[in-house]
Image (cartoon, rainbow, N blue to C red):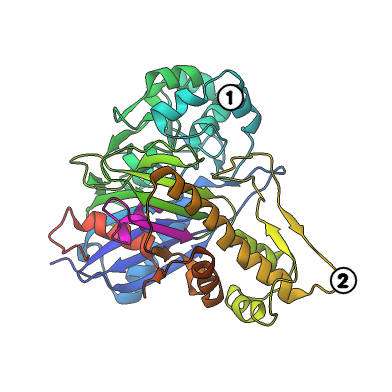
């Protein structure tokens, strides 16, 4: 009898594999970083083949650590960085260009041209999204317009498009399955979240052949068999990372809210089977579920969060590890008047300023490392406050708690500061890996494994 469910967590800076047992306990973890490419200011790319190689590598390593074989794996769940666009040759399997990452702003001017044509309400009504370079549809169009021969090959049916989970499914199944789930499809600016179909009007607007697009399934479904490890393993759960974290948190009922502190910050509120249209700059998107009846969430996205701490470490050399930031922040009584605007790749919700860039304000001769680090942590809490205020205005909800996950939740200073400025409890689970746990739970629903509450 199979002992584990494999959760593949394809992140923005690294890939992980976690093997969960039937009790939802982590039995083995493996993680590897992959290369970030910044060819121009505001441009961010990944090597899709490196994404695949590192994801395959950590899966093998996680099994080897505990002596597991493919026969021991009941199912695979996948969760992924969303909105990152990959286009590859249907026959050779080779990407025609680097993966264009969700953080990339190269299509900002094109997005402005769509707004000038008065299409903002059209996109919001159909997709629940604002017009922004964040989403993958404009990235796909950019590849077709700018990569030599891509447009012609796409029109001949020779190219396939997908976000990271689609690419991984295609590779894991040996090129037999080209599929995605509703949560990822709903982040493309091409998918109608009400009719649950690729929208022909939007495809015509972008001049994108529908043949390039993957089949869309509910998040907890049978996607196909992984043949990469010898014995076939069913792929049974797929969701974008933030919807997976919401599911992993057990936020499956209307009114429940979570925030993930990762490379970016993502605050989601479950709105049940009702798609709530935001007047405050939030997104309406699909939730991860079994698909009997679609569920929706309101989402606020902060593009730069944990990336600020990485910047302090790798570029400014102010810290050696992220773990030391809490003590450094507490070494000073306050921020000394220093404030961070974390807009390295524009400002997301609720402002949606694609051309904004980061700033440090209030510097004086008396400011030191402690003030800088404290301000960097505080800015994550302030941006989360912005999102929660927008949710309150859109829903008139009286929020009793905020559930949190992601790497930064281990920072006691940040979590206490967050609770203080929100004036509600911040609920941190012992297991910070809620994204991978969501992938496990979605896959478990399709097996005889119990799905933990």
- Give the extent of the magenta segment: 242-261
249 part of magenta stretch = yes
| Residue in the picture at 74% in, 65% down | 338
Q: Residues within 10 Å of mark 1 (few under 14, many from 20)?
A: some
Disc 2 target residue = 365
Q: Nearer the viewer, mark 1 or mark 2?
A: 2
Position of residue 372 measured from the top left corner of the image (x, y, whole percent): 72, 69
Total marks shown come to 2
Cα distance in 3D space between marks 1 and 2: 43 Å
First in sequence, mark 1 or 2: give its number. 1
Is residue 48 rendered to the left or right of residue 363?
A: left
Secondary structure under the numbered disc 2 in the rendered image: loop
Question: Does 25 sit above or below residue 73?
Answer: below
305 part of magenta stretch = no
| Residue in the picture at 65% in, 55% down | 342
Question: Does 64 sit above or below residue 386?
Answer: below
Question: Which of these two is toward me, 327 or 2?
Answer: 327
Disc 1 target residue = 115
Q: Quadrant of residue 348?
A: top right
Residue 226 got which mark? none
Secondary structure under the numbered disc 1 in the rendered image: helix
Question: Does 423 sit above or below residue 76?
Answer: below
Q: Would you say residue 148 is visible in this rendering? A: no
Is residue 378 rendered to the left or right of residue 426?
A: right
């Amino acid at each position: 009898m199979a002992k584990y469910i494999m959760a593949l967590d394809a992140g923005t800076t690294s890939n992980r594999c976690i093997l969960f047992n039937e009790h939802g306990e982590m039995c083995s973890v493996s993680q590897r970083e992959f290369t970030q490419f910044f060819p121009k200011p505001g441009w961010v790319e990944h090597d899709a083949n490196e994404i695949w190689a590192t994801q395959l590598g950590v899966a093998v390593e996680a099994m080897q650590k505990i002596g597991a074989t493919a026969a021991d794996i009941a199912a695979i769940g996948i969760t992924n960085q969303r909105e990152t666009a990959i286009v590859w040759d249907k026959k050779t399997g080779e990407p025609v260009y680097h993966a264009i990452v969700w953080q990339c702003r190269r299509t900002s001017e094109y997005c402005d041209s769509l707004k000038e044509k008065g299409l903002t309400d059209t996109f919001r009504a159909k997709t629940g999204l604002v017009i922004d370079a964040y989403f993958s549809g404009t990235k796909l169009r950019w590849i077709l317009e700018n990569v030599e021969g891509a447009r012609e090959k796409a029109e001949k049916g020779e190219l396939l498009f997908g976000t990271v989970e689609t690419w991984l499914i295609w590779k894991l199944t040996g090129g037999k399955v080209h599929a995605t789930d509703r949560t990822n499809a709903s982040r493309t600016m091409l998918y109608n979240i009400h009719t649950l179909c690729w929208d022909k009007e939007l495809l015509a607007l972008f001049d994108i052949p529908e043949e390039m697009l993957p089949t869309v399934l509910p998040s907890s479904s049978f996607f196909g068999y992984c043949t990469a490890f010898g014995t076939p393993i069913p792929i049974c759960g797929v969701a974008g990372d933030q919807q997976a974290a919401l599911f992993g948190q057990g936020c499956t009922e209307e009114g429940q809210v979570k925030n993930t502190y990762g490379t970016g910050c993502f605050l989601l509120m479950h709105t049940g089977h009702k798609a709530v249209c935001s007047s405050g700059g939030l997104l309406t998107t699909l939730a991860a579920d079994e698909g009997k009846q679609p569920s929706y969430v309101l989402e606020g996205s902060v593009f730069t969060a944990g990336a600020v701490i990485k910047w302090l470490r790798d570029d400014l050399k102010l810290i050696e590890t992220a773990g030391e930031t809490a003590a450094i922040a507490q070494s000073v009584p306050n921020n000394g008047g220093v404030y961070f605007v974390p807009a390295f790749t524009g400002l997301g919700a609720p402002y949606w300023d694609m051309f904004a860039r980061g700033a440090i304000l209030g510097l004086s001769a008396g400011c030191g490392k402690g003030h800088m680090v404290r301000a960097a942590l505080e800015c994550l809490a302030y941006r989360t406050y912005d999102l929660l205020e927008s949710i309150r205005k859109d829903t008139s909800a009286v929020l009793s708690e905020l559930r949190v996950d992601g790497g930064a939740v281990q920072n006691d200073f940040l979590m206490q500061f967050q609770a203080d400025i929100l004036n509600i409890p911040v609920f941190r689970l012992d297991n910070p890996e809620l994204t991978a746990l969501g992938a496990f739970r979605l896959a478990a629903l399709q097996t005889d494994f119990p799905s933990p509450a």
